[in-house]
Image (cartoon, grey):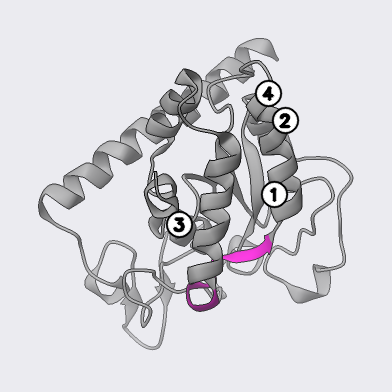
Amino acid sequence: MAPLELAALGVAEARERIGRGTLSPVALVEACLERIAALDATVQAWVHVDAKGALAAARLAEHAAVRGPLHGIPVAVKDIFDVAGLPTTAGAPPFAHRRPDEDAASVALLRAAGAIVLGKTHTTQFAYRDPAPTRNPWNLAHTPGGSSSGSAAAVAARMVPLALGSQTVPARLVAGPRRRLHPRGRRCGGRVRGADAEERRRRARRSAALGAGTRASASRLA
């Protein structure tokens, strides 16, 4: 498959191909990195891309026994969650020097399920109202909303099949009096309708189900 086709795979499709041995985790990570290189200068979804670490993890996954339901799947992590060795800024530049030694519990669970951390994505400052620099990949003149701006944009732009986010305030930003920028509304780039919209919903449901299964399995093991 061409890199663009690989990057466009959903979590369930990618997992099935990796399980059958028809998709290499290395090829999938490389396709995501190529997509990031092509688009992120304008979309600005990523704070930090750990290309070296992700490729190393993908090479290990390629020759290892399946670890869990996300084996070999690249994942983006919102920049309020700690990833060992990567900076956590929470959208606030004064915190850019902080590099945790341990993964956040949610990140550790993703790794235990076999996921490969590709990097950190932009958040509104401290996951609150101050906007992130991220643009809506479907309309660069608009915002993807918040607070998980980068995670949403990275998945929508097919830079990564899965991303970790959170929601501490409603997914909207206020830009001036009486003007709301909402990820479901036209001011954020409009709605996608028809067969393409239904396909995206189907992929999102399957990916969400895999994520929920991972959390449930981890809870039973805890």
User: What is the CA distance from the residue labelled 1 to the residue labelled 2?
Assistant: 24 Å
Q: Residue at x 53, y 43 (%)?
A: 28
**Which quadrant of the figure contains the N terminus?**
top left
User: Please, is residue 132 above or below residue 166 in the view?
Assistant: below
What secondary structure is found at the residue carrying circle 2? helix
User: Please, is residue 6 above or below residue 37 in the view?
Assistant: above
First in sequence, mark 1 or 3: give its number. Answer: 1
Q: What kind of residue is marked 4? A: His
Given residues 49 and 80, the one toward you in this image is 49
Looking at the rendered structure, which numbered label has been put on residue 63?
4
What secondary structure is found at the residue carrying circle 3? helix
Q: What kind of residue is marked 3? A: Ala
Q: Residue at x 70, y 15 (%)?
A: 222
Looking at the rendered structure, which numbered label has been put on residue 60?
2
Instruction: Count the numbered circles shown.
Output: 4
Looking at the rendered structure, which numbered label has been put on residue 188?
none
Residue 109 in the image: state x and y as whole percent.
67, 29
First in sequence, mark 4 or 1: give its number. Answer: 4
The residue that mark 3 highlights is: 152
First in sequence, mark 2 or 3: give its number. Answer: 2
Instruction: Locate residue 198 relative to residue 61 in the image: left or right.
Output: left
Residue 174 in the image: state x and y as whole percent.
41, 77
Looking at the rendered structure, which numbered label has been put on residue 81?
1
Q: Are marks 4 and 2 in contact (CB under 8 Å)?
A: yes
First in sequence, mark 4 or 3: give its number. Answer: 4
What secondary structure is found at the residue carrying circle 4? helix
User: What is the CA distance from the residue labelled 2 to the residue labelled 3?
Assistant: 28 Å
Given residues 188 and 178, the one toward you in this image is 188
Residue 167 appears in the picture as rendered: no
Instruction: Locate residue 25 relative to residue 19 in the image: left or right.
Output: right
